Image (tube, grey):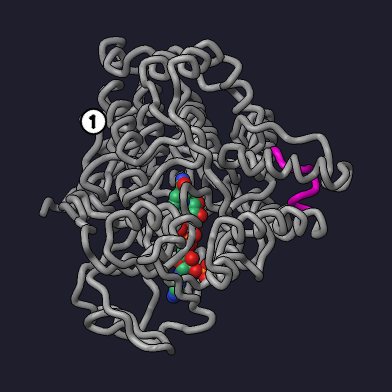
Amino acid sequence: MTARPRAVPGRAPDVDVVVVGAGITGIYQLYRALEAGMSALVLEAGGGVGGTWYWNRYPGARFDSESYTYGYLFSEELFDEWEWQEHFAEQPEIERYLNHVVDRFGLRPHIRCGARVDSAVYDEAAGTWRVTAGDGTAVTARYLVAATGVLSVPHFPDLPGRDDFVGESYHTGLWPTTPVDFAGKRVAVVGTGSSGVQLIPVIAAEVSALCVYQRTPNWCTPLNNAPITAEDQAALRADFEAMCKTLHASPSGFLHQPHDRATFDDPPEQRQAFFERMWESPGFSKLISHYTDMLVDERANAEWCGFVADKVRAIVRDPATADKLIPKDHRFGEKRPPFVTGYYEAYNEPHVDLVDLHETPIVRMTATGIETTEGERQFDMVVWATGFDFGTGALLRMGVVGRSGVPLTEYWAEGPKTFLGIQTAGFPNLFIPGGPHAAAGNNPRYNGDQVDFVTETLVYARDHGYDTIEADPAAEERWTAMVDRWATRAPSFGAGSYYFGTNIPGKPRKYLLNSAGRPKLFSMIAEVRASGYEAFKMSRAPGAAPTAGEPRPPAARAALGPRVRPSPRV
Ligand code: NAP
């Protein structure tokens, strides 16, 4: 284990920026920091890059945002040369893409995999972060960017006897890199969120028996995936400019456009035809391009839910199973809706069973299977599709200690407090793009907005001779209060959604996204710029050496390749 270096006053840190996590946000942050002439190192817990798309490699894992709207847009050359195969790409293609980006822009030498950060302590005297990781890495950095993601800490339910099970056991969010053989096995899947419902129809084709343990059904609607044809590809290339503009203007970062009519503007027949069009439409258009009142008016929402329920009854042959699959406790859009391919159809297979845990709850795990109040069923494999400690899970497990030795776990004991979902007061030079409180929607779009702004702020500080940046507590209080206020407004996710931390026992029930979305993020960023970064206290650290990050010589920059598209200023 390498000795932990201690930053001494006057001594420059080892690197300007340590980024934690080589997921979609961390990779982009690395690119932007290097491009701005800073030295940077990414520490990644996984054995490879990709973050969520490295860990969630379960069969059936795929985007439910359109591939070309989820990928990076900073380089038109990259966009042109990478030909997505499907409108909603599958995990292997996504992982290949992210590896391609890393190599294409010469980022790999700056990424250390297998390095799970276990401690990040702010050294007030030096104005630097001391970061250590499980592989022995110990490094000091002026800036720490935790790009640890919101869905990166898998949640296992605390069931009696969970460790007693002797068969194979997997979590969708910790899927092994070696192949998992389902052939001829009796498999249980616990959980029917977006992960479970993607996995179930794919493995149903291989296993000898599949039993799905469902606590709460979700409003699943078709993803409507399709291959990207040569004509689609040509159109995407030709429309790149326009697509970027549309995505940038979209509050949720999608191409889908809002509808202009409300549910009861249309007579029943026309409404039915519109619902059919929605059912046939791709992914999130069912939220974004729906009737304008679908998410806000209970009667309107109930009309659509009735339509979806009828679809489920029409697909699933056994009426009792169909009924169990129809949500009764929440409206459409109140929880993050999954988008599926062949999910309901899987229950028509004679070897696929559904157990409703509201009727027959799990009593315990046994060595050989799962016991409910109805008795024990035996399995060769159990798959936990039981979700994540959303929003704050990873940040609170990283040993972050800020000014005056205050741990982040203590400062956020009642829930996260942030300014712009970018910084938290008392933790100078720590940035958390892609964490809680940013926006809601197509993640890479608003995480990318945050990375752009973080980078811009670092450059501003450097150009003005500052090396300490810290959110003003009053600005933080206002932003956090705004997040809480918007969380109670419709359209919003219901209090039963994991967006409020409700799936984790003991977690504070605080809203972890930002329902005001990108428009609010953009307007506040514009305000910050206009005020000369007033909401960020900038200073010179008492013992700081000059900031190492100077514009790089052209040769070093060349390794990054051409950056043909400056990120749009917002
Ligand atoms: P999730 O939505 O939190 O679903 C977890 C499931 O496990 C729920 O059905 C939950 O039931 C169940 N569960 C939890 N604890 C349980 C217990 N003790 N006993 C029985 N069941 C239990 O997690 P996820 O499916 O992994 O999805 C998380 C998020 O990841 C999604 O919302 C989405 O944002 C993202 N995701 C995206 C994609 C994509 O298409 N791009 C794919 C997968 C995931 P309850 O509802 O009753 O709590």
What's the residue at 23%, 80% (across, down)? 368
Q: Position of residue 289 (x, y in %)?
A: 70, 38
Residue under label 1, please give it. 108
Magenta part of the protein: which range?
Answer: 289-296
Q: Position of residue 377 (x, y in %)?
A: 32, 81
Q: In this orientation, does residue 79 appear? A: yes
Left or right placement of residue 250 versus residue 156 in this view: right
User: Label 1 sits on what residue type?
Assistant: Arg
**Relative to 422, residue 372 above or below:** below
Task: Say which element carries label 1.
Answer: helix
Q: Position of residue 465 (x, y in %)?
A: 46, 28
Q: Position of residue 328 (x, y in %)?
A: 66, 70
What's the residue at 65%, 55% (across, down)? 308
What's the residue at 27%, 69% (across, down)? 186
Q: Is residue 304 magenta?
A: no
Left or right placement of residue 130 versus residue 246 in this view: left
**Quadrant of the rendering where the C terminus is positioned:** top right
Q: In this orientation, does residue 403 appear? A: no
**Quadrant of the rendering where the N terminus is positioned:** bottom left
What's the residue at 49%, 42% (across, down)? 64
Q: Main secondary structure of the magenta part?
A: loop
**Relative to 79, residue 432 above or below:** below
Q: Is residue 294 magenta?
A: yes
* Neighbourhood count class around disc 1 (C-alpha, 10 Å): few under 14, some 14–19, many 20 upward: some
